[in-house]
Structures are given as structure tokens and as C-alpha cells.
């Protein structure tokens, strides 16, 4: 089975090549470029392609893949909101993803962001490097006995809830479906979570119902000096409204591993560029905001799990019995 791997980074290739001997019937060719309507023709002659969360799998790209005879799309991630599912279904394409690789990796990064913005680690690091040992501007607050609000309690949200519980926090949550394993969590309405939480962490998928769920109205319902963390999807937050909230001093701190304008930035070195008219640049101008580059998943354990599940998905498809739990329908 021949797979064309788009948007290859060195760590992708290293991890997949390490796992590949376990799957002798799978052959992978790696491309540094990402998939798009212009690069999709390179997939001609391949059984499937492997893409990532920021890849362009819209209508135009799928049209080209269909013309090339590609029937399998392997997503080496959990998210699939970048795929035109209607067009994929029309062409009879099978989409397989990695729904759970290491929920603890993302949850731990979410807590790392929360701790960093709370204790101003980004500022203290720079101050000490300049021989400034003053504590001015570095005061935070204890998480112990504060309230953590978890929006979305799937695997990652549940892992974050357990971390917060371990810190001695009261944990409340909002989700359409309650997680029975979280017996220490109190489920509340979204409005109650917003008004009661000292720390709010987003862990829900991006859907029509969750798009821009954090907006002017929901921000106004939050406690003053709240910490907001997003390691899920950028589209959950309406960025212009977030900026207004930051300027109004609503937030003690904001930690973002994802944001609406991230697509051209994710995993790319743009250090020599000037980000004109950039929402990212506006967010980075605030002293109480930390942005990381979609690295919540980026641990050795997570990459190994992603490679293993993706290759297993390819083999299951080849055998005519795709892994049901990993199918995108």
C-alpha cells in the first residue's frame, strides 16, 4: 500500500520510520510541502495520502485527489474540521483519524500555559536574563482552592480536570455529555461555569454549535481576573472580542496554543517576516498573553501513538475493515 505523506517535518519522518518496520505492507513517500489543489496531483498513483490538522482538504483539493484515484485520507491528528466531508462522501473517500493519542500531553500543556500566565514566567525569564531580579509585576495567585471550569470533558478535558483536582482546585464542567469517570467534577450550565471559574480551559471540538462560543457576551459573564486557556481549536474564540476583553482588563491572563489566524504560522519559521495587519501580532502585544505554536500534542509518547494508529488505520483499510472507532463519518 502506497501512502504520500504531506507536510513532513523531521520529527514526523523519524517517528513514522521507526514504526514502519512493523507494517511491511505499507510504503510511505514523504513531501515537505503541504497538500493543496496545486500539490494534490502529486498523489496520483498512491492509494492514500496522510495529512495534518492544518492541511487544506477543501473541495478543490478533494476534486483533484478524486481525479488522481485517491480513496483514503489518513489524518495524523484528532481534528478533521479542515476537511470538506460532504465532498469526500460524494467521492466515496474513507477518512481515518487518530481520535486519542495522548490526552495527557495536551492537558499538561494546558496546565503549563495556565501556570505560566499566572506566575508570569514569560516575563520573569526575560527579566532575570537581563539581571533584573525585581519581583515587581510578577505576582500571581494560588490555584489551590480556586475553581477550575472545564468546557468539554472528553479524554483531554478529563485529563485536565484530574490535573486541576490534583492541584486542590474545585472542578466544575460543562458538556453535553457527562463523563461518569469524573466523580469529583460538578457539572453546571455554561453560564454558571463562566461566572464561577477562576480558570477556564477549553477542550471541546469545533462545530457549528461551538464556533465562537467565547465571544463578547460570554466574556462579559466571566469573573474579573479570570485565566482563559485554549488548547483545542482556535475557532472556539472570537479573537476580536477576546482582544476587546483583554483591553478591558477582564483577564488576569490568556494562554493560547491555538488561535484563529494560526494556519499560515503552524510549525513554520516566520521569524524574518513582519506580520502586518496580523491578529497574532496584536495578541502578542499584550503582556498577559502567552501564545505557543500548536505544540500541545508534541511529546515523544504522543508522536509514537500517532504514528502507530495512523499506520494501523492504513492496514485496516487495506484489509477492507477500517478501524470503526477511527472513521470520520
Image (cartoon, helix red, strand yellow):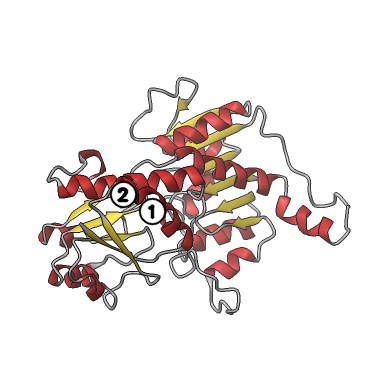
| Residue 142 located left or right of residue 325 | right
Q: Which residue is mark 1?
A: 16
Q: Residue at x 72, y 38 (%)?
A: 141
Is 170 drawn above or below residue 263 in the view shown? above
Residue that badge 2 annotates: 310
Q: Point out residue 143 in the picture as x, y percentages from the top left corner.
A: 66, 34
| SS at circle 2 | helix
Q: Is residue 151 visible?
A: no
Secondary-structure class at tag 1: helix
Q: Residues within 10 Å of mark 2 (few under 14, many from 20)?
A: many
Q: CA distance from mark 2 to mark 1?
A: 9 Å
Above/below status of 29 relative to 143: below
Residue at image location 15% in from the left, 57% down from the top = 93
Which percent across, then down, holds residue 53?
A: 37, 58
Image location (x, y in percent) of residue 157: 45, 37
Front in this rendered view, residue 307 or 126 = 307
Q: Is residue 245 above or below residue 326?
A: below
Measuring 42% from the left and 59% from the top, which residue is drawn there? Answer: 13
Density class for disc 1 (Cα within 10 Å; few <14, some 14-19, many ≥20) is some
Instruction: Tell me where residue 45 sits by quadrant.
Output: bottom left
Q: Is residue 127 rendered to the left or right of residue 324?
A: right
Please say whether residue 174 is visible from this viewpoint: yes
Mark 1 and mark 2 in contact (Cβ < 8 Å)?
Answer: yes
Depth check, front residue: 133 or 74: 74
x and y, in percent, of residue 279 in the image: 53, 69
Q: Quadrant of the N terminus?
A: bottom left
Front residue (pair 57, 167):
57
Q: Residue furthest top?
A: 183
Residue under the point 45% across and 70% down: 264
Mark 2 / mark 1, whichever is N-terminal: 1
34 vs 320, left or right, is: right
Amino acid at each position: 500500500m502506497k501512502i504520500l505523506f504531506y507536510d513532513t517535518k523531521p520529527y514526523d519522518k523519524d517517528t513514522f520510520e521507526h514504526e514502519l518496520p512493523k507494517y511491511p505492507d505499507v510504503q510511505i513517500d514523504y513531501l515537505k510541502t503541504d497538500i493543496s489543489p496545486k500539490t494534490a496531483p502529486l498523489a496520483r498513483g498512491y492509494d492514500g495520502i496522510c495529512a495534518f490538522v492544518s492541511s487544506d482538504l477543501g473541495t478543490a483539493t478533494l476534486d483533484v485527489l478524486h481525479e488522481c484515484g485517491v480513496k483514503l485520507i489518513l489524518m495524523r491528528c484528532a481534528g478533521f474540521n479542515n476537511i470538506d466531508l460532504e465532498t469526500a462522501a460524494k467521492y466515496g473517500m474513507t477518512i481515518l483519524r487518530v481520535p486519542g493519542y495522548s490526552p495527557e500531553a495536551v492537558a499538561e500543556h494546558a496546565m503549563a500555559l495556565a501556570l505560566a500566565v499566572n506566575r508570569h514566567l514569560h516575563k520573569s525569564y526575560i527579566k532575570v536574563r537581563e539581571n533584573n531580579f525585581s519581583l515587581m509585576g510578577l505576582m500571581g495567585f494560588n490555584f489551590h482552592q480556586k475553581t477550575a471550569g472545564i468546557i468539554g470533558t472528553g479524554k483531554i478535558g478529563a485529563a485536565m480536570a484530574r490535573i486541576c483536582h490534583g492541584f486542590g482546585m474545585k472542578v466544575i464542567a460543562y458538556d453535553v455529555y457527562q463523563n461518569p469517570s469524573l466523580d469529583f467534577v460538578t457539572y453546571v450550565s455554561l453560564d454558571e461555569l463562566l461566572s464561577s471559574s477562576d480558570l477556564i480551559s477549553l477542550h471541546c471540538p469545533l462545530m457549528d454549535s461551538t464556533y465562537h462560543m467565547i465571544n463578547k457576551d460570554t466574556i462579559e459573564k466571566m469573573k474579573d481576573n479570570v485565566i482563559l486557556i485554549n488548547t483545542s481549536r482556535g475557532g472556539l474564540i472570537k479573537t476580536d472580542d477576546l482582544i476587546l476583553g483583554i483591553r478591558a482588563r477582564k483577564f488576569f491572563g490568556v494562554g493560547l496554543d491555538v488561535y484563529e489566524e494560526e494556519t499560515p504560522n503552524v510549525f513554520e519559521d516566520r521569524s524574518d517576516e513582519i506580520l502586518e495587519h496580523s491578529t497574532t501580532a496584536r495578541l502578542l502585544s499584550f503582556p498577559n498573553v502567552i501564545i505557543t505554536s500548536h505544540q500541545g500534542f508534541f511529546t515523544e509518547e504522543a508522536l509514537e501513538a500517532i504514528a502507530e494508529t495512523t499506520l494501523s488505520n492504513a492496514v485496516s483499510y487495506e484489509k477492507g475493515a477500517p478501524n470503526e472507532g477511527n472513521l470520520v463519518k
